[in-house]
Structures are given as C-alpha cells and as structure tokens.
Amino acid sequence: MEGYCARASRMLLAAVAMGMASVAGAAFLTRDAALAALEQYSRLIDAAPRVAVFYTQRGDAHYALNDLHGAVADYSAAIRLDDRQDRAYFGRGMALGRLGRVDAGIADLDVYIRRHPNDSVAYTKRGVRNIWRNHLADAERDLARAIELDPNNAEAHDDLGVVHARQQRLERAARHFSTAIRLDPGYQKAYHNLAICFHLRGQPGEALEIVDAGLLLDPDSRDSLLLKSSVLEALGRMDEARIVAERAEFLPESNWSERSEIDAPATQQKPE
C-alpha cells in the first residue's frame, strides 16, 4: 500500500502541475530560460513520472529549443497519460507540421480547435499548415475565422493575403498585407509580401519603397534583398540590382518557418 508521505508528495506535485497548466504554452524569452525549464521539468518528471502536465511543459521547452522530435515525444507522453492535455495537442500539432508531417499535425490542431473553438491563434496555425499542403480553400476559411475572432491578428491578415495572392487576387492580398503592417509595423514579412504584390502588378516604384521599408527592419533578409534586386532590374537600374544580388548571395535564407510567403516572381526565383 502506498504510504501517506508518498501519497502526499504525489498530490502536492499534481497540485503544482495544475497551477502551472495555465502557462504551459508561454513563450520563453531566452534560450537560457528554455534550457532551465527543460532541466526543471526533467527533475519533476523523475520525481512524478505520471503527472501529464510536466511532459507538456517539457515539450514546450523542447519546442522552444527547436528540438522538435523531443517535443513530439513529450507531448505524446502527456496525451497518453491524460487526453485532456489540450496544450499538448496544440504543441504536437505545431511540431509535427514543422517536421513535415503536416497532415498529422493538422489532425492534432483539429482536436485542439474542437475544444477551443474561439482560439484565433489556433485557426491561424492550422491555416498556415493548410497553405503548406496547398489546401487554399481550407486555409482561407481558417484564416478568415482567425480574423473574425481577433481582427487585430496581424499574422492571420498576412497569411490570408498569401492565400489571395496565390489565387491572383492581388488587390485583396495587398489590403491584408497593409493591414498586417498597420497592426504590427515590425512585421517584416508583410512588407516583403506587399512589395511582391506591387511588383507583380507592374508597380516597381511602389514595390521598391515597400521592400526598402522592410529592409530597415531586417537589413540582412536574403529574400527581401533578392526581391529588391528584381525590382531594381524592372526599373532599369541594372548595376544597383547586381550589387544587391551579390550581397544577398552570401546571406542565409530567411527563417519564416511559421509563416507563408508569396511565390517569388520568376525574375528572382532561387535555383534548386
């Protein structure tokens, strides 16, 4: 029979876990904070291996550290222990998508959204994954719902703009990109996407102004520098275009893993 002290310790750990559950999805401000959380929850799991929320919390730390396989393993353990770990379904859906298992990730996000039908962020993330698998009608529904729930959701506006742009609805796309910039003036990818819209519409002057505004936020954005080179070519400024393209050549690709981008114009497509 389990002793009183053991039962009391287990109950105390469970109570602490319940108190932590509300911040399970909180972002870690630094890598050191995520590493500290990973160590903390590993100790707690060693002491109480049947407390599901500890695995959810450690999964969040793994995810923040870009250890996606570790995150999936911990989220799965949490769900096996307690199917009510909604944040584990959300986190696993995010991680599986990033690992390229997009359909499986969407299935997890489906569970989370059924249980949290008013979560704008969840609809946004599922919408992004529907863009990844080119299910544009599903993506449009998800992103429109995200905006309905939270009109100030800049990410959803940007990604809905991507959906419209991929269907050649460039004016509607530009409105959403502009709204994303108005809501979040530091959202660099929205500048990039809006500049592509102007470029595709044959307005290189406007495209250059917008892409330059985005580059003020991230001067080393390889994708935006390549876009600027393409725009300068369209303006006949060939020497400037060459200089910008040479600078971009030695920079890493932009890390927009949770966001979607309009297909680049043919003049600035990168080789396979």
Image (spheres, rainbow, N blue to C red):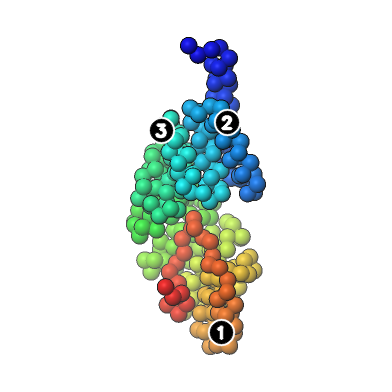
**Which residue, given by chain and number where applicable, does mark 2 sit on?**
44
Query: Where 9 sits versus 126, above or below?
Result: above
SS for callout 1 = helix
Which residue has dot 1 on it? 242
Q: Residue 240's spot in the image, x, y percent?
A: 59, 84
Report the Cα–Cα distance between label 2 and label 3: 18 Å
Please identify the quarter of the rendering in which residue 128 is found. Answer: bottom left
Could you tell me how far apart the alpha carbons at marks 1 and 3 are, in whole angstroms?
Answer: 56 Å
Q: Are marks 1 and 3 in contact (CB under 8 Å)?
A: no
Nearer the observer: mark 2 or 3; the answer is: 2
Tag on residue 80? 3
Q: Position of residue 112 (x, y in %)?
A: 42, 40
Marks 1 and 2, the one that precedes in the sequence: 2
Q: Mark 1, mark 3: which one is toward the viewer?
A: 3
Residue nearest the observer in this picture, 239 or 171:
239
Q: Name the amino acid type tagged 3.
A: Arg
- Tag 1 and tag 2, C-beta contact below 8 Å: no
Q: How many marks?
A: 3
**Residue type (three-letter) at the residue carrying disc 1:** Arg
Q: Is residue 182 visible?
A: no
Q: Give residue 272's position: percent from left, percent from top.
A: 42, 73
